[in-house]
Amino acid sequence: SFSGNTSTVVDAEAYGGSYTSLNDGTASLTYQAPVDPVAFNCRDLRVIGPGSGDWMLSLEVNGVFFTTIDATTIPDGPRQVLYDANICSSDITYEFTLMSGSGAGIDAVLS
């Protein structure tokens, strides 16, 4: 679920024809990954979105700071892999919060 100052950006190259933009420091996305007993709750996290901009996101996993995602390290262009990691936990909740800049786009979260 998205919260705070977000907007929908129509983009023909995005999954489903649009993505969500996190516009200021009040904006965040919380994603609860479904439990997968076959994967023993270890799974790849892949975040897809446009790579352009000057934003920085923080990623928390289960309420604990995990990493930052910085647009300056991602190629400009649509449908870029913004972040990719393997994370293991019994329950997995991801929270992405805009720390600085504006317009961080999230097109898809795969887990």
Image (cartoon, rainbow, N blue to C red):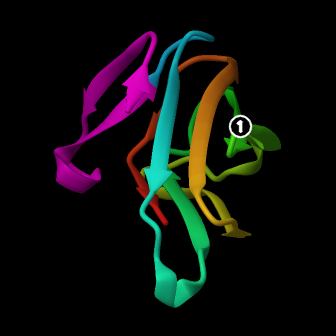
Quadrant for the N terminus, please: top left
Q: Is residue 68 left or right of residue 83?
A: right
Residue at 63% x, 53% y: name it.
75
Residue 63: horizontal and vertical position, in percent?
71, 37
Q: Which residues are magenta?
A: 1-21
Residue nearest the viewer, comparing 32 with 10: 32
- For disc 1, the marked residue is 63
* Image quarter of residue 84: bottom right
Residue at 68% x, 45% y: name it.
62
Q: Tell how many labels.
A: 1
In the displayed structure, 26 sits above or below 38; it is above
Q: Is residue 57 left or right of residue 106?
A: right
Residue at 45% x, 12% y: name it.
4
Residue type for callout 1 = Gly
The residue lying furthest to the bottom in this view is 38
> Under tag 1, what secondary structure?
loop
Residue 104 can be seen, yes or no: no
Q: Is residue 11 left or right of residue 97?
A: left
Residue 33: horizontal and vertical position, in percent?
47, 58
Q: Is residue 100 left or right of residue 82?
A: right
Residue 61: horizontal and vertical position, in percent?
69, 47
Residue nearest the viewer, comparing 66 with 63: 63
